[in-house]
Image (tube, grey):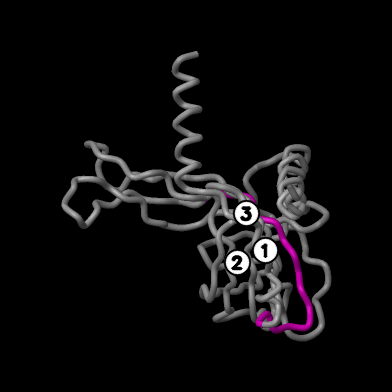
Amino acid sequence: MKRSTLSLATTCFCLLLAGCAAPQSLFDWKARCDGDSVRQLYARGVHVYVSVPSKDGSGSRLWRLKGVEADLYDDTRRLVGRQTHEAAWEAADTSTVTGEVREQKPATSCGAVPWRLYEAQSSSSSGIFANVVHVERTYTYGGNAPLSWKGDQGDGIEARVPFTATYRFHSRGEAPGEPPSAAWGNGLSATHAAATMAGVYGREKLQRKPSASR
């Protein structure tokens, strides 16, 4: 009980220090999201970090983002693609898009990676990611790097931090048809996948809910 209480107190203290950002509006982003159609997908996976020595000579180590591994689901909770890096996505129809961060805002969930607006650097000419010009990452949950530490754990240690997010792909031209289901995945059963995405939808709905006035 003592350990649990201490752990809870430590967690609350860390959250207090980090602060919880107030919900942010994307309305000022929309004017910069060129495109004639939008496809919304939901990501579930991990941010992979690797430990590296800090440069201040303190002997502490920091976490550097190594990559992102996530599955992408559509509104029917079908697995239709994957995220292969921080700003790289691939669909089951082999279409791809890569981007570069242009803007970001604090997440509405404490401890979550920030919301981001990406500008597409390359995209396929056909498929669901054809002619993508902008990508939004919103309603994130989790994914932040662990705290740095001191000790003899060494360099090159990986940390895999679970996260979920909503992605909106803005494309020019007519919207492509429904994407095929992906052949890969993380081995989730249909029931487990549905429950997972229900959690994503639930968190998005909760984060969209306006704050109660006092």
User: Do we see residue 71 in this rendering?
Assistant: no
Q: Which residues are magenta?
A: 32-46
Residue occupying image coordinates x 41% and y 51%:
49
Query: Which residue position is annotated with label 2?
Result: 89
Q: Is residue 130 left or right of residue 2?
A: right
Classed neighbour count for the residue bearing mark 1: other residues with Cα under 10 Å, few (<14), some (14–19), many (≥20): many
Q: Is residue 133 magenta?
A: no
Nearer to the camera, 180 or 174: 174
Q: Say if mark 3 contacts mark 2, CB within 8 Å.
A: no
Residue 203 x/y as whole percent: 71, 47
Q: Is residue 149 left or right of residue 170?
A: left
Residue occupying image coordinates x 62% and y 72%:
96
Residue occupying image coordinates x 51% and y 56%:
68
SS class, disc 3: loop
Q: Say if mark 1 contacts mark 2, CB within 8 Å.
A: yes
For discs 1 and 3, the disc positioned in front in the rendered view: 3
User: Do we see residue 77 in this rendering?
Assistant: yes
Query: Which residue position is annotated with label 1?
Result: 167
Predominant SS along the magenta part: strand
SS class, disc 1: strand
- Occupied quadrant, residue 192: top right
Q: Amino acid at mark 3?
A: Thr
Q: Amino acid at mark 2?
A: Trp
Q: Is residue 44 magenta?
A: yes
Query: Which residue position is annotated with label 3?
Result: 108
Q: Amino acid at mark 1?
A: Tyr
Residue occupying image coordinates x 65% and y 81%:
133
